[in-house]
Amino acid sequence: MRDDYDYPKIEEKWQKIWAKERAFEVSEDSQKTKFYLLEMYPYPSGRIHMGHVRNYSIGDVIARFKMMKGFNVLHPIGWDALGMPAENAAIQQGVHPQKWTMDNIAHMKWQLQKMGFAYDWSKEVNTCLPEYYKWNQWIFLKLFEQGLAFRKKSWVNWCPQCRTVLANEQAAGGVCWRCSYEVEQRKMDHWFLKITDYAEELLSGHNLLKKWPEHVLIMQKNWIGKSEGALVDFFVPALKKAIRVFTTRIDTIYGATFLVLSPEHPLCHELIADAREKTRLQDWISQAVMDSRLKRDAGEVEKEGIDTGKKAINPFTRQEIPIWIANYVLMEYGTGAIMAVPAHDERDFEFAKKYSLRIPIVIEPESSSAEETKTGELFVDYGILRSSGPFSGLRSEEAMEKMAKYAEENGFGKKSITYKLRDWGISRQRYWGTPIPIIYCQKCGIVGVPYEDLPVRIPYNVEITGEAGSPLERVQEFINTTCPKCGSKARRETDTMDTFVDSSWYFFRYCSPDEDRIPFSRKPVDYWLPVDLYIGGVEHAILHLIYARFFTKILRDLGLSAIDEPFPHYLAQGMVTKDGAAMSKSRGNVVDPDEIVQNYGADSLRLFILFAAPPEKEFAWSEEGIEGCFRFLNRVWQLFQECKDLFKDKAGSEKRNASQNKGFLRLQKKIHQTIKKVSEDIERRFHLNTAISSIMELTNSIKKEKENLINSEEGRELLKEALEKLILLLSPFSPHISEEIWERMGHKTRLYCSSWPEFSAELAKEEKATIVVEVNGKVRDKFEAGLDMPEEQIKEMALSLSRIKALIQDKPIKKIVCIRNKIVNIVI
């Protein structure tokens, strides 16, 4: 090779060597500590994008670092290969979904290999192959046998554009998560998984997730939505039956002046007997349910209702109150019916105002007198009960306990817990998904496909037209079958599974991807699981992560594994942006990774995408940034060229006399400080940007001290050590150039299996400075930091102080002014 930095040849050379040597393939080894490093696997859309590059570069640094630290590292990759985009491509481009998917996988695999990621390709999984989705079906049948997979008619989110059902999580904001088309409501037969049976465990399991971002845990808690309260029955004389409501504020029940039912409530049609009124009611209900339930829940539709003319009896006051049907009540939450207390609930208050309904006050602030609280006010906090019979004068908390007990003793209620979380609807009316392994027989009813007949394969002789309904409905040889119980003619289920089923357990399959008797082997799963670090976008905080946690508990209860939580440590990466907006084709601001690799090399791209921002922060693309990282790698290459004769000398003695040369002492100290800093930044904080900054500083120090040291034996030995340590530290970030220099230094061992450098605690000691932290010019706190620590790191440390966080809260920061080694002033 030439002496210039010929990155295309260097990168191609080492990618071939790693592939030939099967460098990153691993198996279970009881003598080594395992580390399972996983990034969320990609959908094979055709090309990797900068979000992929960032995610996988972060993971690759940590994987290579752990390898060099002596861990047995499992770092697999695969393909989330089923789903609507393949069908859309079939419609638009006339190419079969299987061919489109497999061609995309081949290209994206080539791209990932060109980036030099240290994947164990022997563990590769592909969810669109029968060898994988067979086990989706196997797990489904196990759940079906236990009643955890069931079928019922229900209102579902329907995307007219994608022509399929969406889970609530996939229709957030009332639009389709794939195409952003407005979601409609349809009532249809649907397969569900009973995730609600695990609601409490999904919530309490958060206590085990100490290394998750707090905002992700909050998002999940809100989605699960645990509410403690009471069930209360309101008897309806006209129907001779009761309407059951759930309330979290039974202390307000004396102020309940009307009941409200969801338009989907099964009693709606019984409440109106007159034929003309029924027609009016039906028209109104149809319009109400057409409005997305998600929009209704978020309060994004105008509150409307209809009076049924029927009355219910408040069991506490024994008074009759009117029964209404309103669009702001959802069948999915609680019982689909509420007691409306307009003085103490904002939505009830707005509704009562609109329809001139009574608004009596039964709770008042503890600090107020009855005279100060006027009728018509809204008070939603806890307080003191008034006009509440024998419970008047009690505080809300005490009253709720006593009133729930009273209701239970008198047979019309009890304490209860409910969850916002709904069962997971997995039926999809599309072709490119896992066929649900169910057969319908007129004699035997719903029958599971026998295990020995799995997989139920996706048929390939299908015409994708884009017409409503599943394409499988038009494939007679797929639909028509025989009942495995009685042998009669029967038909197959034509719905396919939500693709989130595929990604809910793939991390188990990586441990034994060739297992053909069960979904995965127990022994390797017991060794590798749980995943030690999971990296992916925060957009999956609800959809994927809750489902994956749910499946982990299902698989545990099936006896297939012993773990409760799959991902005890989750790193949520920030988005990649350009020109102030997230990269997307529609915005025309996409940067092609292939073009960058061609112009600058994979090592420069990896280095830049890690250097520009901490992993959890938003990353802004800039041409100047990638050029700067390319120049830095050229400087490293040139520095080695200038010093390459050092590695032709015979090895010097390890024993080194104390030197009076200040340059020697400075560089010696810098080496050990850099090893310490880079090690801690990778392992403890994932501050990969500051780790790279430290490597750059060490490079500058070597360059600066070189001429001063190169003429003495002692100095030459130190320069040689400094260069070797520099390359060891750089290797997880830019592995190709590092391996090439390492080899040219004369080392026979590959860098990825070399040991991570150690540091001397004594030599790594930093001179400290006390940094005063001001907020708007006032001293609020202080901390110690290394002398001349980079400004960005000083800012991060200041902002992380608990006192400073409490002062700033959500207030926008106008600017941060740093005075080196002295002051940080945060202006808000």
Image (cartoon, rainbow, N blue to C red):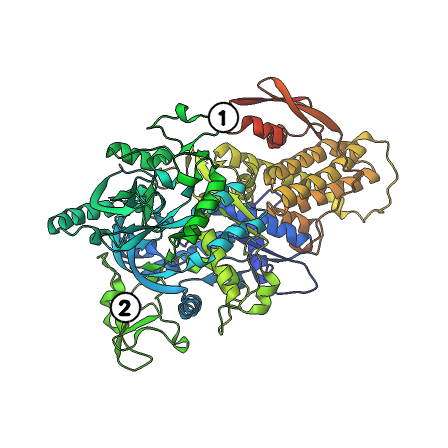
Q: Residue at x 37, y 30 (%)?
A: 378
Q: Position of residue 490 (x, y in %)?
A: 26, 76
With 401 as the anchor, is 238 left or right in this view? left
Name the outermost residue toward the top.
777
Query: Where is mark 2, residue-wise?
Result: 461
Could you classify mark 2 by the number of other residues whose Cα lies within 10 Å: few (under 14), some (14-19), or many (20 or more)?
few
Q: 69 above or below 637?
A: below
As helix, strand or loop, the secondary structure at mark 1 comes to: loop
Q: 483 above or below 217?
A: below
Quarter where residue 430 is shown: bottom left
Mark sitting on residue 639: none
Q: Amino acid at mark 2?
A: Asn
Q: Nearer the viewer, mark 2 or mark 1?
A: 1
Q: Nearer the viewer, residue 263 or 523?
A: 263
Q: Residue at x 36, y 42 (%)?
A: 585
Could you classify mark 1 by the number of other residues whose Cα lies within 10 Å: few (under 14), some (14-19), or many (20 or more)?
few
Q: Nearer the viewer, residue 240 or 700?
A: 240
Q: Residue at x 49, y 74 (%)?
A: 517
Q: Nearer the viewer, residue 443 or 105?
A: 443
With 141 as the anchor, is 776 left or right in this view? right
Q: Amino acid at mark 1?
A: Pro
Query: Where is mark 1, residue-wise?
Result: 812
Quarter where residue 632 is shown: top right
